[in-house]
Image (cartoon, rainbow, N blue to C red):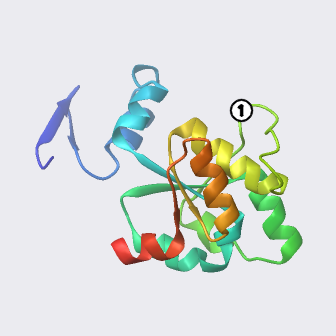
Amino acid sequence: MDNLLKFSGFNISSSGSTVDTLILLYPKLINLACLYIFNMFAVISPSAFGKLKEILGSNKNYKFVITTLGVSFAIKSGIDIDSALDRGVIVRAFSHKPPKVGNLPQYESEAIMVAFELNALLIAEDKDVINKAKELGVNAIPIEELLASS
Protein backbone atom coordinates (compact mmCIF):
# COMPACT_ATOMS: atom_id res chain seq x y z
CA MET A 1 0.00 0.00 0.00
CA ASP A 2 3.00 2.30 -0.09
CA ASN A 3 2.72 2.80 -3.82
CA LEU A 4 1.43 6.03 -5.21
CA LEU A 5 -1.53 6.02 -7.53
CA LYS A 6 -1.37 8.14 -10.66
CA PHE A 7 -4.90 9.44 -10.95
CA SER A 8 -5.53 12.03 -13.63
CA GLY A 9 -2.20 13.71 -13.02
CA PHE A 10 -2.50 13.65 -9.22
CA ASN A 11 -0.17 11.64 -7.03
CA ILE A 12 -2.35 10.25 -4.28
CA SER A 13 -1.00 8.02 -1.55
CA SER A 14 -2.82 4.71 -1.32
CA SER A 15 -2.80 4.93 2.46
CA GLY A 16 -4.52 7.33 4.79
CA SER A 17 -7.18 9.49 3.20
CA THR A 18 -7.10 8.21 -0.38
CA VAL A 19 -10.81 7.57 -0.52
CA ASP A 20 -11.61 10.96 0.97
CA THR A 21 -9.34 12.63 -1.59
CA LEU A 22 -10.83 10.71 -4.50
CA ILE A 23 -14.36 11.52 -3.38
CA LEU A 24 -13.52 15.20 -3.20
CA LEU A 25 -11.88 15.19 -6.63
CA TYR A 26 -14.16 12.76 -8.46
CA PRO A 27 -17.32 12.11 -6.44
CA LYS A 28 -19.23 10.44 -9.28
CA LEU A 29 -16.52 7.82 -9.76
CA ILE A 30 -16.71 6.52 -6.21
CA ASN A 31 -19.76 4.66 -5.03
CA LEU A 32 -20.67 3.62 -1.53
CA ALA A 33 -19.41 0.08 -2.08
CA CYS A 34 -15.87 1.42 -2.50
CA LEU A 35 -16.08 3.04 0.92
CA TYR A 36 -16.63 -0.36 2.51
CA ILE A 37 -13.53 -1.75 0.79
CA PHE A 38 -11.21 0.99 2.02
CA ASN A 39 -12.67 1.67 5.46
CA MET A 40 -13.46 -0.46 8.43
CA PHE A 41 -16.36 1.02 10.35
CA ALA A 42 -16.92 0.66 14.08
CA VAL A 43 -20.17 1.84 15.64
CA ILE A 44 -19.84 3.06 19.21
CA SER A 45 -22.84 2.09 21.31
CA PRO A 46 -24.18 4.73 23.71
CA SER A 47 -23.37 2.31 26.54
CA ALA A 48 -19.70 2.87 25.65
CA PHE A 49 -19.80 6.69 25.63
CA GLY A 50 -18.22 6.79 29.10
CA LYS A 51 -14.95 5.55 27.58
CA LEU A 52 -15.16 7.48 24.31
CA LYS A 53 -11.67 9.03 24.60
CA GLU A 54 -10.06 5.65 25.19
CA ILE A 55 -11.94 4.11 22.26
CA LEU A 56 -10.96 6.89 19.86
CA GLY A 57 -7.33 6.67 20.94
CA SER A 58 -7.22 2.89 20.70
CA ASN A 59 -7.29 2.14 17.02
CA LYS A 60 -6.68 4.37 14.03
CA ASN A 61 -7.79 1.71 11.51
CA TYR A 62 -11.48 2.33 12.13
CA LYS A 63 -13.84 5.02 10.93
CA PHE A 64 -15.87 5.49 14.09
CA VAL A 65 -19.63 6.06 13.90
CA ILE A 66 -22.18 7.15 16.47
CA THR A 67 -25.89 7.30 15.83
CA THR A 68 -28.32 10.19 15.84
CA LEU A 69 -30.22 8.70 18.77
CA GLY A 70 -26.85 8.21 20.47
CA VAL A 71 -26.15 11.94 20.11
CA SER A 72 -29.58 12.69 21.59
CA PHE A 73 -28.86 10.29 24.47
CA ALA A 74 -25.49 11.99 25.11
CA ILE A 75 -27.05 15.45 25.19
CA LYS A 76 -29.86 14.36 27.55
CA SER A 77 -27.39 12.53 29.80
CA GLY A 78 -24.84 15.36 29.90
CA ILE A 79 -22.15 13.28 28.18
CA ASP A 80 -19.60 15.40 26.31
CA ILE A 81 -19.18 14.07 22.76
CA ASP A 82 -17.84 17.31 21.27
CA SER A 83 -14.23 16.11 21.21
CA ALA A 84 -15.31 12.94 19.38
CA LEU A 85 -17.14 14.99 16.77
CA ASP A 86 -14.13 17.29 16.44
CA ARG A 87 -11.96 14.23 15.77
CA GLY A 88 -14.13 13.20 12.82
CA VAL A 89 -16.51 10.66 14.29
CA ILE A 90 -19.34 10.15 11.81
CA VAL A 91 -22.94 10.66 12.95
CA ARG A 92 -25.33 8.38 11.11
CA ALA A 93 -28.96 7.37 11.37
CA PHE A 94 -30.38 3.98 10.50
CA SER A 95 -31.84 4.13 6.99
CA HIS A 96 -35.35 3.35 8.25
CA LYS A 97 -37.13 3.84 11.53
CA PRO A 98 -34.98 1.63 13.74
CA PRO A 99 -36.86 -1.37 15.10
CA LYS A 100 -36.76 -2.05 18.81
CA VAL A 101 -34.30 -4.84 19.50
CA GLY A 102 -35.47 -6.93 22.43
CA ASN A 103 -35.96 -4.85 25.55
CA LEU A 104 -33.08 -2.50 24.74
CA PRO A 105 -33.59 1.27 24.63
CA GLN A 106 -34.21 2.75 21.18
CA TYR A 107 -30.77 4.41 21.07
CA GLU A 108 -29.04 1.06 21.65
CA SER A 109 -31.28 -0.60 19.05
CA GLU A 110 -30.28 2.02 16.49
CA ALA A 111 -26.58 1.43 17.18
CA ILE A 112 -27.05 -2.30 16.55
CA MET A 113 -29.01 -1.69 13.34
CA VAL A 114 -26.47 0.83 11.98
CA ALA A 115 -23.67 -1.65 12.70
CA PHE A 116 -25.72 -4.31 10.90
CA GLU A 117 -26.36 -2.02 7.94
CA LEU A 118 -22.69 -1.01 7.60
CA ASN A 119 -21.41 -4.51 8.32
CA ALA A 120 -19.42 -2.79 11.06
CA LEU A 121 -17.97 -3.73 14.39
CA LEU A 122 -20.14 -2.69 17.35
CA ILE A 123 -18.29 -1.50 20.45
CA ALA A 124 -20.41 -1.66 23.59
CA GLU A 125 -20.10 -1.88 27.34
CA ASP A 126 -23.55 -3.34 28.07
CA LYS A 127 -23.51 -7.14 27.85
CA ASP A 128 -27.19 -7.22 26.79
CA VAL A 129 -26.37 -4.99 23.81
CA ILE A 130 -23.49 -7.26 22.81
CA ASN A 131 -25.62 -10.41 23.13
CA LYS A 132 -28.55 -8.99 21.13
CA ALA A 133 -26.17 -7.74 18.44
CA LYS A 134 -24.54 -11.15 18.14
CA GLU A 135 -28.00 -12.77 17.86
CA LEU A 136 -28.56 -10.57 14.79
CA GLY A 137 -25.19 -11.49 13.29
CA VAL A 138 -23.43 -8.25 14.19
CA ASN A 139 -19.77 -8.48 15.20
CA ALA A 140 -19.89 -6.94 18.68
CA ILE A 141 -17.14 -6.66 21.26
CA PRO A 142 -16.78 -5.17 24.73
CA ILE A 143 -14.59 -2.10 25.14
CA GLU A 144 -11.97 -4.07 27.06
CA GLU A 145 -11.41 -6.38 24.10
CA LEU A 146 -10.91 -3.43 21.75
CA LEU A 147 -8.49 -1.73 24.14
CA ALA A 148 -6.53 -4.96 24.68
CA SER A 149 -6.08 -5.45 20.92
CA SER A 150 -4.57 -2.02 20.27
Residue 84 vertical placement versus 62 (above, below): below
Q: Secondary structure at mark 1?
A: loop
The answer to whether residue 133 is left or right of residue 18 is right
Q: Report the amino acid beneath label 1.
A: Ser
Name the residue nearer the viewer: 144 or 8: 144
The residue located at (61%, 59%) in the rendering is: 130
The residue located at (80%, 38%) in the rendering is: 99
Among the 4 quarters of the image, the one containing residue 18: top left
Residue 111 vertical placement versus 116 (above, below): below
Total marks in image = 1
The answer to whether residue 95 is left or right of residue 89 is right
Image position, residue 31 (x, y; %) = 45, 24
Q: Spot the residue most to the top.
A: 28
The residue located at (60%, 79%) in the rendering is: 51
Name the residue nearer the viewer: 141 or 110: 141
The residue located at (74%, 56%) in the rendering is: 108
Instruction: Give the quadrant of the C terminus.
Output: bottom left
Name the residue nearer the viewer: 113 or 37: 113
Image position, residue 17 (x, y; %) = 35, 49
The answer to whether residue 130 is left or right of residue 58 is right
Image position, residue 112 (x, y; %) = 66, 49
Among the 4 quarters of the image, the one containing residue 83: bottom right
Q: Residues within 10 Å of mark 1 (few under 14, many from 20)?
A: few
Query: Is residue 45 shown to the viewer in this render?
Result: yes
Image position, residue 146 (x, y; %) = 44, 70
The answer to whether residue 99 is left or right of residue 85 is right
Q: Spot the residue most to the left.
A: 3
Among the 4 quarters of the image, the one containing residue 19: top left
Query: Is residue 150 shown to the viewer in this render?
Result: no
Badge 1 is on which residue?
95
